[in-house]
Image: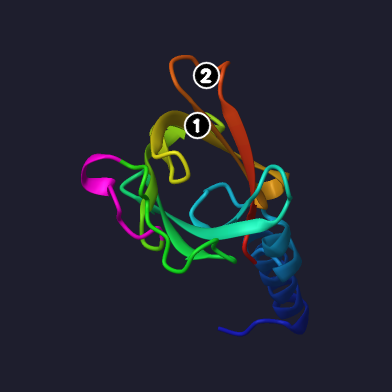
Amino acid sequence: MHFSPRRIACFATSLVVLTASIVPTRQAMAQAPNDSPAGRWKTVDDHTGKVRSIVAIREQSGTLFGTVESLVDPPVPNPTCYLCSGDLKDRPLVGLQVIWGFTKDGDRWSGGHVLDPETGKIYSGWIALEDGGKKLRLHGYIGISLIGRTEHWQRVE
C-alpha cells in the first residue's frame, strides 16, 4: 500500500489532535483539584495560628483513617494521651489514630469519628476539602452537627 504525502500529513495531524485531547498537559494535571483527603496535613492551633502537628490521612476501601505522624514543638517530650480512656489511655501521641470511619458522602466525608488528644474526647464529624484540595475543614460535634467545633488544616506539599 502506498500513501501520498498529503494523506500522511493528514493522518499525522489527526493523531496529534487526538493525542492532545486525550493526554492532559502538565499544567492541567497541576491545576486538577485533589478530591480526596488522603495525604499529609498540617494541623493549626485555633488561637495562635501555629502548626501543631502533621497528620497522615489514608484511604482504605473507601474509608478514611488519620494518624499523628509528628508533633511540632510539643509542650513535653514524647507526650501521651493521658486524658484518653480505655485502650487509648497513655498511648504516645505520635502514631495515635485520631481519625477513623469517614466515608464519601456527596462533596464531603462523614460518618466517622475524631479524637481530640488534648481532652481525650471522641467526636462525630465530617470532613470537607476546600481551595482545590489544599485545605481541609474538619468539623467535630457531639449530638447534632450544628453545634461543634471546626478546624482548618493545610495540605503538606
Question: Where's residue 60, x and y in %?
Answer: 33, 51
Q: Secondary structure beneath disc 2?
A: loop
In the image shown, does 140 or 137 lie closer to the viewer? 140
Question: Where's residue 130, x and y in %?
Answer: 68, 42
Quadrant holding the C terminus: bottom right
Magenta span of residues: 85-93
Say if the magenta span includes residue 40. no
The residue to which callout 1 is attached is: 126
Q: Secondary structure beneath disc 1?
A: strand
Q: Residue 145: which numbered mark, if any?
A: 2
Quadrant holding the N terminus: bottom right
- Compared with 4, 83 (above or below) is above
Identity, as a three-letter code, of the amino acid under mark 1:
Trp
Q: Is residue 111 left or right of residue 13?
A: left
Instruction: Choose top left, top right, bottom left or bottom right for residue 108.
Output: top right
Say if the magenta span includes residue 87. yes
In the image shown, does 111 or 77 lie closer to the viewer? 77
- Callout 2 touching callout 1 (CB < 8 Å): yes
Question: Where's residue 42, x and y in %?
Answer: 60, 57
User: Please, what is the dominant secondary structure of the magenta stretch?
Assistant: loop
